[in-house]
Image: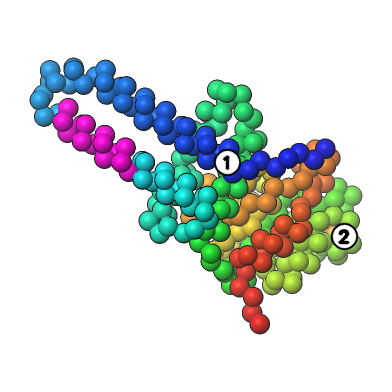
Amino acid sequence: MTKKPTGKALFLWLSTISLILLMIAVTLLWYFISPRLHEFNEAFPFILLTGLRIFFFILVIGSILVLLTALTERNFIIARFAVHLFIKIMYPICVFMSSLVGIKEELIGESFVKVNDTFIRSMRKKFKAKDVLILLPHCLQSTECKIRITTDPSNCIRCMKCDIGKVLKLAEKYNVEVAIATGGTLARRIIIDKKPNIIIAVACYRDLVSGIRDTYPIMTMGILNLRPEGPCINTKVEIDKLQKTLDSIVLQSN
Ligand code: SF4
């Protein structure tokens, strides 16, 4: 069964609501404790209130920049730091918030991957082919295939029974390296070894989210795999989507 892809709006809405609730909670806390603070020292509440105002100001400006970046896909230079914090911090907060209202984590994860992609696209940057790495999950390989491809993807004879062969053919056209990982630990080791400037990762939402957050500031564009036979077995990738992503980030040498 094909399901409707989740858009970036879900994650952006949840983030905005979470930050508004955070500000309300901090303000209420201030309201209740400030009379007691006056009893200790007259200057202390003033210093704390000033700090709180600065914190709120930075939070609001940072959030506006992040939202503008995600919605317009334009690069606001001073937004880079805000985007960095957003990627590192907001996901677990949004997952917690969504669990309170019964939204599945999978939807949040898919939406987060799309928001992250817009941050990368907003930079309108192209990379040399040698700086790009396509990272594939092992579950893309046909379970009937006995060829060992994790250590060396070029062992694949491209019989095209699974999407590994199609990805390798496409990667060859763009002169981009492909690596296949059996899990998060191996994926991290591959990234340390190959030192790419940008990664195009194919995986389920869970692996994509952890990959994007763990490897930052190395940029990771995520493509969700298709799971016609369920998770982790004979999965597929939309080759058109992968080609469009390569087109958008790889510098073509004429
Ligand atoms: S395309 Fe490659 S990995 Fe896939 S089944 Fe054929 S030989 Fe095996």
> Which residue is identified by label 1?
9
Picture coordinates of residue 197, whole percent (x, y): 54, 63
Q: Nearer the viewer, residue 116 or 183?
A: 116
Residue for point 16% across, 31% down = 46
Magenta range: 45-58
Q: Tell me the CA gap for discs 2 and 1.
A: 36 Å
Q: How many marks?
A: 2
Quadrant of the rendered image holding ligand 1: bottom right
Of the image marks 2 and 1, the number of the one nearer the N terminus: 1
Identify the main secondary structure in magenta: helix
Q: Position of residue 183 (x, y in %)?
A: 67, 46
Amino acid under disc 2: Met
Where residue 49 appears, x then y in whole percent? 21, 31
Whole-percent x and y of residue 13?
52, 36
Pointers 2 and 1 in contact (C-beta within 8 Å): no
Tell me the quadrant of the picture where the C terminus can be found.
bottom right
Question: Which quadrant would the N terminus be assigned to in this image?
Answer: top right
- Give the image quarter of residue 4: top right
Seen at 30% across and 22% down, the residue is 29
Residue at horizontal 80 percent and vertical 40 percent from the top? 2
Please name whichever residue, 170 or 188, is drawn nearer the observer in this view of the structure. Answer: 170
Give the secondary structure at mark 1.
Answer: helix
Describe residue 43's horizontal placement relative to residue 79 as left or right: left
In this view, which residue lies farthest toward the bottom?
254
Determine whether 83 is above or below 100 in the image: below
Q: Residue most toward the front?
A: 72
Judge whether residue 183 can be spotted in this image: yes
Which amino acid is tagged 1? Ala
User: Is the CB of the residue bearing disc 2 within 8 angstroms of ligand 1?
Assistant: yes
The residue tagged 2 is 160
